[in-house]
Amino acid sequence: MSRKCAKCGVVSEIEETFPKSYYSDKIFYCPTCWEKNAVQRGESFLIACVIVLIGGLAWVTVSPQNEFTWLVFQAGLLMCFILILALPHELGHTLAAFMTKAKIFQVTIGLGRVLYNHDFWGIEWIFRAIPFCGYTLIGFNNRKLYRLRSFLVTLGGPLANCFLIFAAVILLFHISSPWLLAVTRSFIAANVFVLLFSSLLPRKVNFAGIITPSDGLTLLTVPFMSELKINQEIEANYVWEVYSYYMKGRVEDARQSYEKGMAYFPDSPAIKNEMGKMFLYLGKYIEARNLFVQLQKSTNLSPVMKNGILNAIATADVMMGGNGLLEEADAFSKTACENMPWQTEFKGTRGLVLVKKGHIEQGLTLLKEAMGKTENSSHKAVYASYIAEFENKKWE
Ligand SMILES: [Zn+2]
Ligand SMILES: [Zn+2]
């Protein structure tokens, strides 16, 4: 069954790629619109927090005798604390991951535009414009005490909130200023809210279009995790290992992770797919194309991966050039773009193919759109160089 995005009208035959709306099971959005909606909700919440806080603060200053003004001020504080508590919560998961010798790939705080992105302690730290919610991407590369270690890593987040509540309660007994009391009480309330509602309430969470279990649901289910699920998670770990190594330029480490992953899962299309992407990233187009062409013959490919492979082969083709390859790139990138029209990377490849085929105006439009949207700096650089080259040709 196909799904239609309720906002931009794009249609997809690949059902699982369109997450449903927060408010209705019958409304779906494409990943791009879903993220836009989430960012808009986050922005509204951020603005509401600031208004309530500043309004409350002004009101308390004017009439400090009125109990209600303090309530409004504390509500503003509570909302702002909820925003910033994503960071200590995620740090709790990160610390637990460190102690259980998990691989920590990425810590993301917030939604929307990337404000700051830095590699520190071998972890990619990403801070986005709206500091509302976050996630820590971790993995284990072996089965040793898998369920216990996963349980402990999940527990790390809620434990961080418990620790903050405990520290703030102790502080409450040592302060008497009404301002400090208001701040501390709101801080405790915000932690209790995050702990009970955001973290421990057992439910499925829709984060940036990816449905994941809340900490509470994970804690309840992880002790009974099936062997199949454990294998899937270890496989995903190798995919991330290869990706994060080559993105840091550690090609030899990426290759070793690939080989370890292949020894564990000799038929894994996901790990091979990531290795192919590394070859593309390094400009080794012949190796990339060979790997993707071989991978295309696998029987156990998801629709998303099938289209990703078409796009990857088209990328290798267009970079190598030559008429035969350019025709293949044209056919493959067209199919990939039609099947997943919201994919920025696919649009970029389509743009490259079109400019190389002489449809400069059409290709440049797609390249500019892809350059504006992509968060991948190497893609941005490739798009920019082609835009520069073909903008000139337009006038020749
Ligand atoms: Zn849409
Ligand atoms: Zn958590």
Image: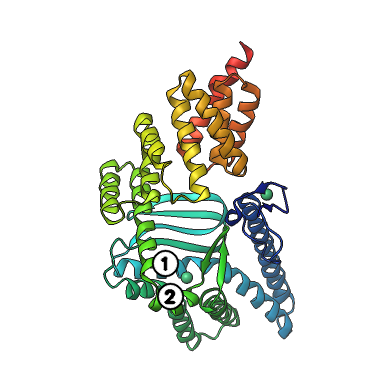
Residue 112 image offset from top left, x and y in percent: 58, 53
Q: Residue at x 33, y 47 (%)?
A: 245
Which residue: 61% across, 27% down? Answer: 363
**Residue picked out by circle 2:** 160
Quadrant of the snapshot with the C terminus: top right
Ranked by sequence position, the earlier of labels 2 and 1 is 1
Q: Position of residue 199 (x, y in %)?
A: 51, 74
Residue 91, label in figure: 1
Q: CA distance from mark 2 to mark 1?
A: 8 Å
Q: Residue at x 73, y 51 (%)?
A: 7
Residue 290, image quadrant? top left
Q: Residue at x 73, y 83 (%)?
A: 68
Residue type, numbered disc 1 = Leu
Pointer 2 with pointer 1, Cβ within 8 A: yes
The percent coordinates of residue 206 (x first, y second) are 58, 64
Left or right placement of residue 96 versus residue 256 in this view = right
